[in-house]
Image (spheres, rainbow, N blue to C red):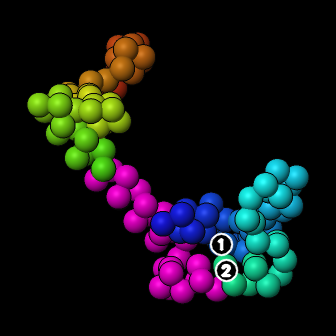
Amino acid sequence: GMFQVYRVAGGEAGMRHFMAQFGPCLKWPWTKLMDVPEFNDELVDLIATQSDDQAHGLSIRELEKIRDENLVAIMEALSKQNKGKGWGAGALHKDYTKQLARLAAKKPTASKAVEKAKAENPKKKKKG
């Protein structure tokens, strides 16, 4: 959910850090047009505690890995839409993975600079 996104955005310091960065915007003038809670230490403690509970002890790095795997899964699902051509980010993902597969299938070749250096400085046979 959104709180997990904010927790990850806070980095290793988590939700408290995120709230310290962005919480003060709750005091901006246009927030008076909405029902916005008062930004204070009590609110930060409440949200940070709820965020800790929601994370079930997972580190920020673990949450990032879960997020990334889920995003890739969404793109892979989208890549199968539109009669197999892909849709939106899925089409881009499909084209990108095809390009990577083509590059991986190519046999590595020595660069021209390496070939030139070998031609200019052939290895001498060891005397023995």
Label 2 crowd (10 A; few <14 / some 14-19 / many >=20): many
Whether label 1 touches label 2, CB < 8 Å: yes
> What's the residue type where badge 2 is placed?
Ala
Which residue sits at x=43%, y=61%? 67
Q: Which label was assigned to residue 70?
A: none
Q: Secondary structure at mark 2?
A: helix
Q: Quadrant of residue 52?
A: bottom right
**Where residue 48 is drawn, which disc sits there?**
2
Residue at point 79%, 55% (across, down): 33
- Between 32 and 92, the residue placed more toward the observer is 32
- In the picture shown, does residue 28 fall above or below 121? below
Report the quarter where the C terminus lies: top left
Magenta span of residues = 49-73
Residue at image point 67% right, 79% down:
47
Q: Is residue 23 left or right of residue 58?
A: right
Q: Quadrant of residue 3?
A: bottom right
Q: Is residue 97 above or below residue 19?
A: above
Magenta: main secondary structure equals: helix
Q: Residue furthest left?
A: 83
The front one of 125 and 44 is 44
Q: Amino acid at mark 1?
A: Gly
Whether the magenta-drawn stretch holds residue 55 is answered as yes
Measured as percent of width and height from the top left, residue 51 is found at 59, 79
Residue visible at 46% across and 71% down?
Answer: 62
Image coords of residue 126 (percent x, y): 31, 35
Question: Label 1 belongs to which residue?
Answer: 14
Whether residue 127 is in magenta: the answer is no
Count up the numbered dots. 2
Classify mark 1: residues with Cα within 10 Å, few (<14), some (14-19) or many (20+).
some
Spatial distance from mark 1 to mark 2, Cα to Cα?
8 Å
Is residue 82 something one can see in this rendering? yes
